[in-house]
């Protein structure tokens, strides 16, 4: 059966775009961190929406599981195949249209990288509202599928808020097009919303129309340090309601110490917890920001950048965090949103859980504090300690009113915990939708549901 299927897939996408090379498949079957891996029978790289639909029809008709892969930067093992799957890569769906400056939008194939969208928007004098440090690899199709957040969610919202049109190859192999030339369109069900955050369980996104934003005339960035996490959270609470707030990023000084030591990017201020703040507006924001920061009593004079080079130096402190996390092997990751009042208590309890279940490991925290979003990364955590520690931390999150996923999605890593954040009727409704679109359950079967 596999030989016949491979021949048919090769005919659908062209022989050069199908491989069953074991080395390629082994590399593609591991997650971004290298902590989780599965097994695949082939990799296909369709070059058009029609080819994606053809691949889906062939796989559905032969009872073959399919796992969709964009940039494979998922941090919840969302692209790890568990059923000897065909891997469907969107990397050749990489056409980026002309920016429509009047309507402030651009059409992109699902495999276009976030960095390419930023470049195109910038060249047209506009900006794209979502940014994350995996920008060179993450694709807009993958980002819509996970409803990605990121560094500017506090200003522009998540990926879903940037999507104004969508093309999707459905599990039955038909193509659904929901594009509209106008801004306001209330015709019928808002079907695109179904595919945002569905993590590829309901169809393969093949193309998107993306909203762009005017570029703010002025931007100022600062980093300030706090001795207590509570004080930083209180500062973030006040700052997040400011007009023009563009970023509010929490950085644990323990991880800044690591970036200083390993990458030569030290914290520019003292304090156990750092807050990166960015303000935008039509006029110079430096004085306004300085006045706000003074009221917050940071433990040191804030480092402020109001020209491009100085701002980039401050952002480098945040960006370096992602680069340094792998220095002790694959980190164990948690992505959670908590009520702001629960953040400091949770951080202390998570540290205690790490000391108890994985004494050789240590936790560092960073995240988008405007949304109460924390990324807890446990470094040097052995595979043996992982199961108990994972359950313990998920319980801490549940006890404090947090969620299973803040922005990374559920993937395969968190599917066992879905009921922590969603009730039985909610899960039943999601399963009914999945069954309506994909009755045999062959598409992204490892993701979302147990
Ligand atoms: C350094 C780093 C920083 C990150 N920072 C952030 C952050 O700030 N905010 C945030 O939200 N996430 C962040 N992430 C996580 C990750 O980048 C996002 O989840 C991103 O949206 C994934 O995009 P991708 O193209 O890599 O998708 P993949 O990892 O390839 O796939 C993600 C999921 O979507 C499915 N999928 C992929 N493409 C499609 C498609 N076209 N149609 C249907 N399903 C599809 C996959 O099957 C999988 O389940 C970060 C990751 C890294 C490594």
Image: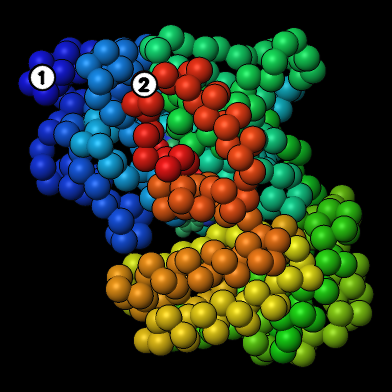
| x, y percent for residue 176 | 52, 12
| Residue with the most extreme left position | 3
Q: Vertically, is 363 above or below 165?
A: below
Which label is found at residue 1? 1
Give the x, y percent position of residue 319: 53, 65
Q: Which residue is mark 2?
A: 440
10 Å crowding of disc 1: few (<14), some (14-19), many (20+): few
Q: Examine the rendered structure and indicate whether residue 85 appears above or below residue 97.
A: below
Give the left or right position of residue 30, taking residue 364 as reference: left
Pick whichever, 64 or 73, lies toward us: 64
Task: Report whether residue 321 is seen.
Answer: no
> Which numbered mark, 1 or 2, is in the foreground of this view?
2
The residue that appears at 76% across and 19% down in the rendered structure is 183
For the image shown, how many numbered marks are present on the structure?
Answer: 2
Q: Nearer the viewer, residue 178 or 268?
A: 178
**Picture quadrant of residue 447:** top left
Instruction: Name the quarter where the C terminus is drawn.
Output: top left
Residue 181 shown left or right of residue 10 in the figure: right
User: Helix, strand, or loop for circle 1?
Assistant: loop
Image quarter of the N terminus = top left
Q: Around disc 2, counting alpha carbons within 10 Å, would you say few (fewer than 14), some (14 to 19), or many (20 or more)?
A: some
Q: Position of residue 117 (x, y in %)?
A: 54, 37
Q: Is residue 227 visible?
A: yes
In percent of width and height, residue 24 lies at 16, 43
Secondary structure of the residue carrying numbered label 2: loop
The quadrant holding residue 54 is top left
Q: Residue at x 61, y 40 (%)?
A: 424
């Amino acid at each position: 059966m596999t030989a016949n299927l491979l021949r048919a897939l090769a005919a659908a996408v062209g022989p050069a775009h199908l491989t069953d090379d074991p080395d390629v498949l082994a590399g593609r079957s591991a997650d971004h961190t290298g902590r989780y891996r599965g097994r695949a029978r082939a990799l296909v790289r369709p070059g058009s929406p029609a080819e994606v639909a053809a691949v889906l029809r062939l796989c559905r008709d032969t009872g073959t599981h399919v796992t969709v892969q964009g940039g494979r930067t998922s941090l919840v093992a969302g692209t790890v195949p568990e059923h000897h799957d065909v891997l469907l890569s969107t990397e050749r769906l990489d056409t980026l249209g002309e920016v429509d400056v009047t309507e402030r939008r651009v059409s992109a194939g699902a495999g276009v990288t976030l960095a390419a969208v930023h470049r195109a928007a910038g060249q047209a004098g506009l900006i794209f509202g979502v940014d994350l440090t995996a920008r060179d690899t993450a694709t807009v199709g993958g980002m819509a599928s996970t409803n990605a957040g990121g560094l500017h969610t506090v200003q522009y919202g998540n990926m879903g808020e940037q999507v104004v049109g969508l093309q999707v190859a459905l599990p039955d192999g038909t193509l659904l097009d929901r594009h509209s030339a106008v801004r306001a369109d209330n015709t019928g069900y808002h079907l695109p919303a179904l595919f945002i955050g569905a993590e590829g369980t309901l169809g393969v996104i093949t193309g998107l129309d993306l909203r762009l934003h005017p570029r703010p005339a002025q931007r100022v960035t600062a980093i300030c340090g706090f001795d207590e996490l509570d004080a930083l959270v209180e500062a973030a609470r006040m700052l997040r309601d400011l007009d023009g707030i563009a970023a509010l990023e929490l950085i644990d000084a323990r991880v800044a110490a690591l970036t200083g030591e390993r990458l030569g990017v030290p914290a520019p201020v003292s304090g156990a917890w750092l807050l990166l703040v960015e303000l935008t507006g039509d006029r110079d924001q430096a004085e306004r920001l300085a006045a706000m920061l003074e009221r917050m009593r940071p433990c040191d004079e804030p480092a402020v950048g109001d020209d491009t080079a100085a701002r980039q130096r401050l952002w480098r402190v945040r960006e370096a965090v992602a680069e340094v996390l792998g220095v002790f092997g694959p980190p164990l990751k948690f992505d959670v949103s908590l009520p702001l009042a629960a953040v400091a208590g949770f951080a202390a309890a998570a540290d205690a859980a790490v000391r108890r279940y994985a004494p050789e490991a240590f936790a560092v925290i960073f995240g988008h504090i405007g949304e109460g979003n924390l990324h807890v990364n446990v470094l040097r955590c052995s595979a043996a300690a992982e199961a108990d520690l994972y359950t313990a931390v998920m319980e801490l999150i549940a006890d404090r009113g947090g969620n299973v996923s803040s922005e990374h999605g559920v993937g395969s890593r968190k599917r066992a915990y879905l009921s922590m954040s969603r009730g039985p009727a909610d899960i039943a409704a999601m399963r009914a939708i999945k069954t309506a679109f994909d009755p045999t359950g062959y598409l992204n079967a490892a993701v979302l549901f147990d």
